[in-house]
DNA sequence: GTACTGACCAGAT
DNA sequence: CATCTGGCCAGTA
């Protein structure tokens, strides 16, 4: 492609989509990938999130996996932070640590 | 180049 | 519900 063309990066498009998720709602990796125009790119979304700098304003905590769970090691700081941030927004977890996508999944 | 890994997923069993 | 399978894409060794 010719230089001088400022097209948004894949990462930027992913940030853009995540930024649209309303407070108190969640979206799955696959859903974010889909809305960002990718296809079968759920893994890329996860990778982009793993590279986010600390203190980012992107509401990364609103992105969970297709099973309604948090895709971070259960005993990691990130896991605890994501869960508490979601609960603070009103998103409820069941005993298995899963969210009801039926109730909290964002529908654009 | 191959092989393995990972904040993934849908479908089949 | 648990497991497995094949697919996906990038980075790393």
Image (tube, coloured by chain):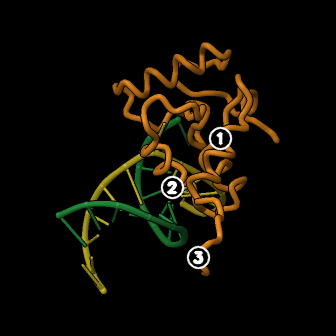
Chain colours: A orange, B yellow, C green
Q: Residue at x 62, y 72 (%)?
A: A4
Crowding at mark 2 (Cα within 10 Å: few <14, some 14-19, many 20+): few
| Quarter of the image that includes the C terminus of chain A | top right
Mark nearer the viewer, 2 or 1: 1
The residue wearing badge 1 is A18
Tag 2 secondary structure: helix
Tag 2 near tag 1, CB within 8 Å: no
Q: Which chain does the numbered disc 1 sit on?
A: A
**The label number, if any, that marks residue A43 in the structure image:** 2
Chain letter belonging to callout 3: A
Residues beneath discs 2 and 3 located on the same chain: yes
**Circle 3 SS class:** loop
Which quadrant holds residue A54?
top left
In the rendered structure, find residue A54 and report the number of the disc placed on it: none
Instruction: Decide if residue A86 is on the left or right side of residue A47.
Output: right
Check the image and name the residue furthest to the front. A4
Q: Are marks 1 and 3 on the same chain?
A: yes
Q: Are marks 1 and 3 in contact (CB under 8 Å)?
A: no
| N-term mark: 1 or 3 | 3
Residue A80: percent from left, percent from top: 43, 21
Marks 1 and 3, Cα distance to the nearest angstrom? 28 Å
Residue lying at the far right of the rendered structure: A108
Give the residue displayed 67% in from the left and 46% down from the top. A16
List x then y, in percent, for residue C9. 51, 67
């Amino acid at each position: 492609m010719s230089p001088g063309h400022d097209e948004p990066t894949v990462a930027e498009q992913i940030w853009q989509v995540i930024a649209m998720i309303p407070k108190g709602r969640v979206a799955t990796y696959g859903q974010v990938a889909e809305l960002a125009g990718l296809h079968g790119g759920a893994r890329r979304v996860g990778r982009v999130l793993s590279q986010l700098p600390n203190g980012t304003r992107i509401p990364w905590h609103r992105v969970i996996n297709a099973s309604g769970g948090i895709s971070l090691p259960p005993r990691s700081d990130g896991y605890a932070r994501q869960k508490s941030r979601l609960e603070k927004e009103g998103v409820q977890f069941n005993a298995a640590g899963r969210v009801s996508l039926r109730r909290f999944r964002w529908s654009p």
